[in-house]
Image (tube, rainbow, N blue to C red):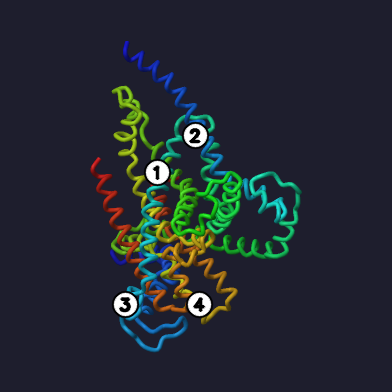
Amino acid sequence: MSQTRREKALSKFLAFGATPLIIFTGVLVYPFMQGLFLTFTDWDGFDYTKVEGIQNYTKSLTDPNFWTTMAFTLKFVIVSVIFVNLVAFGLALLVTSKLKSSNLFRTFFFIPNLIGGVVLGVIWQFIFNTAITSVARKFNVPFFQDSWLNDTNKAFWALIIVTVWQASGYMMIIYITGLISIEPEVVEAATVDGATPLKLLTAIKIPLMAQAFTISLFLTMRNGFMAYDVNLALTGGGPFRTTELISMHIFQEAFAFGHFGTGQAKAVIMFIMVAFAALVQVAVSKRMEANQ
Amino acid sequence: MSAVKSLRKEKKHGSFGRKVTFWVGLFLSITYVAPFFLVLLNSFKTKYDILGNPLGWPQVFTLDNFQQALEKMNFFRSLVSSVIVTFFSVSALIIFSSMLGYYLARTKNKFTKTTFLILVASMIVPFQALMIPFIGIWSKFVSLNNQAALILFLSRFWRRSFNIPLSRIHFQNPNRN
């Protein structure tokens, strides 16, 4: 009896589970493990001759450029997570307030999402380099006269603006899902009890849609750490590699300078960092969800 | 009495608030779409016109930019490559993620639970951690051009591999048909 049951389970596994899992292993698990192993060797992108230990890691961690990039990335992640979510939640509130044109607005807010990061970067590069500067010269506004992309601090904010503009539409959809899943009876009861709109928002709506916050905080954080295409197309890391995010730094390390070993080691460090941040964030959010 | 009053107040407030939300929404919509409009507008201008007058209407209407783009960047070839890569990665993804999602939803044991956790965890593996080994592994077998296509394919595949958890949830949904 148990034999046939086991056979049944096995055939089910072979029919449905085996193929995808083999592919998953080949595409993700194997390269990841391979990459992990290669960081401990003297690998040059093609072959390795001997196992070297943690040299690649010590080299990465003593690289001052790596730490600058790391600090810049962390700043970028924190600021972009805050602004993307604030804007996205605001937009979600706006399009769920019973306006006739809310469907149209929703479409407009989502449009930047339909186009890849490289194209968006090129568009905004034109805006920052040409459009804004020409208007500023005409009206003599010194703050905008030189392109923002030529100044490290302003280029940072340019990156944030483009990221918020691109990502807020997608996160808005998640927040909309959260907002409309709230039972209307609860809102009505609170209104009858005399809750002001602000109180309604902070005491009823936000706690009831805490899960949406968990998801979109996680997604924005992950996207922030992994941002590459907008960075590449907008600033290209310039001026003088000061606006390089971690993804770009790793890419440069491996392919521009040919340091495959340290590049891979930095990627592993990045993975550990993202994993740690994600675990902390999800744990904190779950606790907040449970506290309701 | 006070309830009626507050209701009336709310109605008044509501119509005013609605107007404000409408205008805010309109303003934001315009800012969200403006960059695209700007690019579209400038694509009809001459090079000189773009630099001298990036915000205004084109002084001379021209389609030269489009012609040049088509000639220079092999637009149709790139388009065909994109379509092929998209077609194969999306089909593979739909087939395999629903297969695995079905399996993970309907079979409950330690193995499926662990597999599911690994799949969720794989969402946070940065592509950079895979990219370099990819090239190391595949450069031995495949020519550079095919390799690029393959990497694109794999990267899309990887990026969307969290569809598997999604389809698992779908198959677990008791309201399924």
* Tag 1: amino acid: Leu
Whether label 4 touches label 3, CB < 8 Å? no
Element carrying mark 4: helix
> Would residue A22 be visible to someone looking at this image?
no
> Would residue A284 be visible to someone looking at this image?
yes
Q: Chain of mark 4?
A: B
**Residue B24 disc label:** 2
| Cα separation between marks 1 and 4 | 43 Å
**Residue A86 disc label:** 1
Q: Position of residue A236 (x, y in %)?
A: 51, 64
Classify 10 Å Cα crowding around label 2: few (below 14), some (14-19), many (20 and above): some
- Which residue shows up at 26% across the image and 45% down it? A288
Classify 10 Å Cα crowding around label 4: few (below 14), some (14-19), many (20 and above): some
Q: In this rendering, would B44 be left or right of A270? A: right
| Cα separation between marks 4 and 2 | 52 Å
Up-down: is A71 above or below B8?
Answer: below
| Cα separation between marks 4 and 3 | 28 Å
Residue occupied by mark 4: B138
| Cα separation between marks 2 and 3 | 52 Å
- Which residue shows up at 45% across the image and 44% down it? A173
- Which residue shows up at 54% across the image and 70% down it? B150
* Tag 4: amino acid: Trp
